[in-house]
Image (cartoon, rainbow, N blue to C red):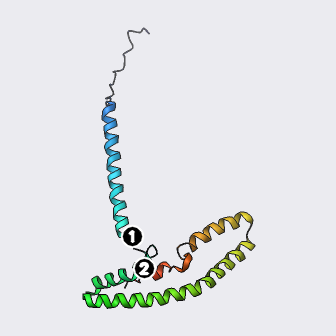
Amino acid sequence: MSENNIEEAPKIEVARRPWRRSLLLGFVILLCGGAIGSVITGVTIERRPERGSRRPERVPEKIAERMQEKYGLTDDQTQKILVVMQEHGKKLSDIRAEVQPRIDAEHEALRIAVEAVLTPEQATRWREEFEQMRGPWHRSGGESSPSAACPPKT
């Protein structure tokens, strides 16, 4: 066979995209992802339930405002609700301050008792998980728990 008898396969030209177009497309996709992420973050933050633990002194005011919106209270009713919430909130805070040391001691006893059963590696993992579980509920300085800071939804 000679080389002349062999037909060459037709060459297929592959369309090549200019690198600028690919770069621009990648940049547009990045911007769209950033925009979508920003919107989702904004909505999530806006809808996040407010917890009074950051500013416990504002909890009665927030509760009164929510009740005014939800129940259509007059300004006079809202003011009276605010006074009631402040008065009883102080009493509840005092009770929590009295009881919290006992609760803290029992939590510590529980943690230690469980750790006594575990290996050192297991105990380390348990301690970390225990503190994470306990974290939202434990506040130093007699602050209120998250459940007390946020009224139940009805």
**Residue 73: image location, x then y, percent:** 26, 88
- Dot 1: few (<14), some (14–19), or many (≥20) neighbours within 10 Å? few
* Residue at 45 percent of width and 80 percent of height: 149
Q: Taking 152 as reference, is 117 above or below it? A: above
SS for tag 1? loop
The foreground one among 121 and 149 is: 149
The foreground one among 121 and 22 is: 121
Q: Please tell me which of labels 1 and 2 falls first in the chain.
A: 1
**Residue 8: image location, x then y, percent:** 37, 17
The C terminus lies in quadrant: bottom left
Query: Which numbered marker is on residue 57?
Result: 2
Query: Which numbered marker is on residue 56?
Result: none
- Dot 2: few (<14), some (14–19), or many (≥20) neighbours within 10 Å? some
**Residue 107: image location, x then y, percent:** 64, 79
Amino acid at circle 1 = Arg
Query: Which numbered marker is on residue 48?
Result: 1
Amino acid at circle 2 = Glu
* Residue at 39 percent of width and 14 percent of height: 6
SS for tag 2? helix
* Residue at 60 percent of width and 70 percent of height: 131
Q: Is residue 73 visible?
A: no
